[in-house]
Amino acid sequence: MELLQLQYFLAVARLEHVTEAARSLHVTQSSLSKTIQRLEEDLGVPLFDRSGRKLRLNEFGSRFLRRAERALFELEQGKQEIRDMTSAEQGTLELAVTTASALPNILREFRKKRPYVQYHVQMLSMQEMVTLLHRGEVDFCLSSPPIEEDDIECQIVFIDPILIAVPKGHRLANRSSVSLIELKDEWFVGVKKGYGIRDFVDAVCHSVGFVPKYVYEGDEPARLSSLVEAELGIAFIPSTARNSRGDIHYLQVENHEFVREIALLWHKSRYISRAALEFREVVVEYFEAISKLRH
């Protein structure tokens, strides 16, 4: 069994399509198909149910996929460890976030400590982030809500109050707080379902007797303040995403512990480089500093 066979198998198993897998691997479809066929011959069983160029993992394939992912994962960890030993001042950091409100400040602080470390950040839905975590393809995730799973380490770094953002001329703009039920007839701007904060606030609103009415649902949380300012609707905004614009007023929520937990997540078996360890320190120190300022 060859390493190349495992790499090709992983690509086909994840995409379940020969053409797309060949494109992602930059190889011809015939070469990919022959490699998968040789692997199946080595194993003595078919790994896919076939329908033209569309493939679907069968029971043999599903079982083998878990083992193949683990084997390639360990090899990748070995490569990262060697890179870390030979070029500790450089390296790369793979990050995924479901909440990005504090990220610019965190990355600014990290850049001061490790100016030569490159980083790559993806803004993802919860399900997309969980998939990358399980595969061990990211160093850290900054997530709200936290995730409790066997192979994932979870460290709560901040308890973040959720506020109500209204435009300056809104009927509630002279108030400092509001009960959720008072918002039942309002129009909201928010992120799409699947983002942690959207799922959380929808569930809490439902528990008090109403379903928020959205006039805008997007995947860029940073845009919500501009939409509130333009008087398109009001929004649920975490305190870490609050800005000082004069045309937006923020209210606290009465009679509910309306907060979200922000967590730092990582795969328990993924090798943590020295740069990644320093990033974790920066994240913890940043949120500790915010907590002290608020008390």
Image (cartoon, rainbow, N blue to C red):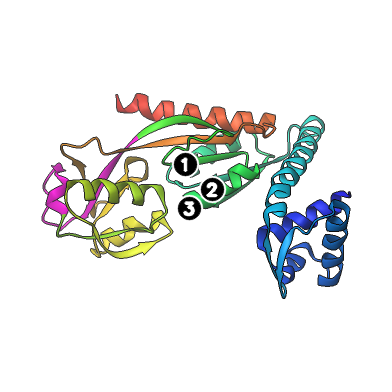
- Residue 16 location, quadrant: bottom right
Viewer-side residue, 5 vs 26: 5
Residue 244 is at least partly visible in this image? no
Q: Could you tell whether 120 is left or right of 104 in the image?
A: right
Q: Is mark 1 on a helix, strand or loop?
A: strand
Q: Does the magenta stretch include residue 287?
A: no
Q: Earlier in the sequence, mark 1 or mark 2?
A: 2
Which quarter of the rendered picture does the C terminus lie within?
Answer: top left
Q: In the rendered structure, which amino acid carries the disc numbered 3? A: Ser
Work out which residue is located at the far bottom of the displayed protein and give it: 52
Position of 285 relative to 241 (above/below): above
For the residues labelled 1 and 2, say whether their Cβ atoms are less than 8 Å apart. yes
For the residues labelled 2 and 3, say whether their Cβ atoms are less than 8 Å apart. yes
Identified at 59% across, 34% down, the residue is 151
Question: Where does the magenta region start and end?
Answer: 160-183
Real-space CA distance between mark 1 and mark 2, rounded to the nearest whole angstrom:
9 Å
Identified at 23% across, 63% down, the residue is 231
Viewer-side residue, 241 vs 243: 241
Identify the residue under disc 1: 143
Residue 45 in the image: state x and y as whole percent.
80, 56
Q: In the rendered structure, which amino acid carries the disc numbered 2? A: Met
Q: Earlier in the sequence, mark 3 or mark 1?
A: 3
Q: In the rendered structure, which amino acid carries the disc numbered 1? A: Ser
Residue 291 in the image: state x and y as whole percent.
36, 27
Identify the residue under disc 3: 125
Q: Is residue 161 magenta?
A: yes
Identify the residue under disc 2: 129
Identified at 72% across, 73% down, the residue is 53
Viewer-side residue, 205 vs 90: 205
Residue 204 in the image: state x and y as whole percent.
25, 45
- Residue 117 location, quadrant: top right
